[in-house]
Image (cartoon, rainbow, N blue to C red):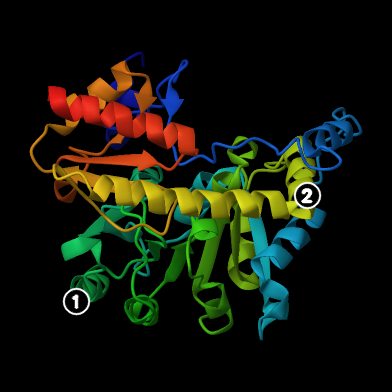
């Protein structure tokens, strides 16, 4: 049994591993990270206060398996206690949102015995929805977005009727397009769904809307968030909120101690000092507006409005691969989306950075466009 094909599932062998390039000394605008570190200049120096607390953590002991204190703090941060049915709601934590997506995909089943569960999401969307469906041997249905990357409601409702998905993911704002869909369209999808619906609010810190209040209205709805985009990507902490009856089942397949002691402490510390992180998010929103205006002034490309910390743009005459390569050679990393989906033809995505990083990106982009 030394032949890989005899032991490894065909759909796994057909996948490509998720590739993260080594940035070296380049300006990193490819992964939707917050470019700012802990604000050390504030009174008390947050970085030093955090480091002092780290020294008190008992690394010889296993962490709290339920991360109880952190879960309660995160539930309050999400606004769950004020909802009408707060007693019926709970929260479960994951090693990033990716683990929560995987747990959900592992848990659901098709209503017909023996059939594979179906997972459905609009496309282009977060790549891990489809990848994780393949990991767990589920069917995946991607429904193309309409013009301007709006939700194609008739297509979504038709796909729901045909495939009867056990799980629907709705990224809000959407990644990689950055837009918020209409509440009416979202509501129609939730009400038509025969299974669970997850609204993925990874970028809610930069958006003008949240659907957390809907948890009081729709028992099959779950809302997922992460601390990665607010400046804590290194913690790898995601959270899933919804009815206790669903999360009770998800907890059964969550591996013990999946949230380590250092993450639990660091996230709890951050929640007690959110003002600087909130201020950083507001600064990034201002930088997003400035960067969007600068890109819109370039005749050779089209940039889309965004409610996230990134901007999607299409090159109208230049080749995306060549521009992407030129930027990398100049020490600026952004994301090439051309080839990922037909609707992302000649598209690139840039994370909003500091003012200096954005200016350097624009300078490098001008060089790339002239040489392409």
- Residue 215 coordinates in the image, percent (x, y): 56, 77
Q: Can you see residue 165?
A: yes
256 or 25: nearer the eye? 25
Classed neighbour count for the residue bearing mark 2: other residues with Cα under 10 Å, few (<14), some (14–19), many (≥20): some
Q: Is residue 86 left or right of residue 29?
A: right
Q: Secondary structure at mark 1?
A: helix
192 or 43: nearer the eye? 43
The correct choice, above or below, for 253 with respect to 22 in the image is: below
Residues at marks 1 and 2, CA–CA distance in whole angstroms? 43 Å
* Residue that badge 2 annotates: 268
Numbered tag placed on residue 165 in the rendering: none
- The residue sitting at 36% across, 16% down in the picture is 1
Q: Place residue 194 in its image quadrant.
A: bottom left
* Residue that badge 1 annotates: 154
- Residue 303 coordinates in the image, percent (x, y): 24, 51
268 or 321: nearer the eye? 321
Q: Place residue 109 in its image quadrant.
A: bottom left
Q: How many marks?
A: 2
Q: Secondary structure at mark 2?
A: helix
- The residue sitting at 23% across, 48% down in the picture is 297
Outermost residue, right side: 56
Outermost residue, left side: 317
- The residue sitting at 60% across, 43% down in the picture is 231
- The residue sitting at 51% across, 39% down in the picture is 33
- Residue 176 coordinates in the image, percent (x, y): 33, 49
Tell which circle, 1 or 2, labels the residue nearer the N-terminal end: 1
182 or 59: nearer the eye? 182
**Quadrant position of the C terminus in the picture:** top left
């Amino acid at each position: 049994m030394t032949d890989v094909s005899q032991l490894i599932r065909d759909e796994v062998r057909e996948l490509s591993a998720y590739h993260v390039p080594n940035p070296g000394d380049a300006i990193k605008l490819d992964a939707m990270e917050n470019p700012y570190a802990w604000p050390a200049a504030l009174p008390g120096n947050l970085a030093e206060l955090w480091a002092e607390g780290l020294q008190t953590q008992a690394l010889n002991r296993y962490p709290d398996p339920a991360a109880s204190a952190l879960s309660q703090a995160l539930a309050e941060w999400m606004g769950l206690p004020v909802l009408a049915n707060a007693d019926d709601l709970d929260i479960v934590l994951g090693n990033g949102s990716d683990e929560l997506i995987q747990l959900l995909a592992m848990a659901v089943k098709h209503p017909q015995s023996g059939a594979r569960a179906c997972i459905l999401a609009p496309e282009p969307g977060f790549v891990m929805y489809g990848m994780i469906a393949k990991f767990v041997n589920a069917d995946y249905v991607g429904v193309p977005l309409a013009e301007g990357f709006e939700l194609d409601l008739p297509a979504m409702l038709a796909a729901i009727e045909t495939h009867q998905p056990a799980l629907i993911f709705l990224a809000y704002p959407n990644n990689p397009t950055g837009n918020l869909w209409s509440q009416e369209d979202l509501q129609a999808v939730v009400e038509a769904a025969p299974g669970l619906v997850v609204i993925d609010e990874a970028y809610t810190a930069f958006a003008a809307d949240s659907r957390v209040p809907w948890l009081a209205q729709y028992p099959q709805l779950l809302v997922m968030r992460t601390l990665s985009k607010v400046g804590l990507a290194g913690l790898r902490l995601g959270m899933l909120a919804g009815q206790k009856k669903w999360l009770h089942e998800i907890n059964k397949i969550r591996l013990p101690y999946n949230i380590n002691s250092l993450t639990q402490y660091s996230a709890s510390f951050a929640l007690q000092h959110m003002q600087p992180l909130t201020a950083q998010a507001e600064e990034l929103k201002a930088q997003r507006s400035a960067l969007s205006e600068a890109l819109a002034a370039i005749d050779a490309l089209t940039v889309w409005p965004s409610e996230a910390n990134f901007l999607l743009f299409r090159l109208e005459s230049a080749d995306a691969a060549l521009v992407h390569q030129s930027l990398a050679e100049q020490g600026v990393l952004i994301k090439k989306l051309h080839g990922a989906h037909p609707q992302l033809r000649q598209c690139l995505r840039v994370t909003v950075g500091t003012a200096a990083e954005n200016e350097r990106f624009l300078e490098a982009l001008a060089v790339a466009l002239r040489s392409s």
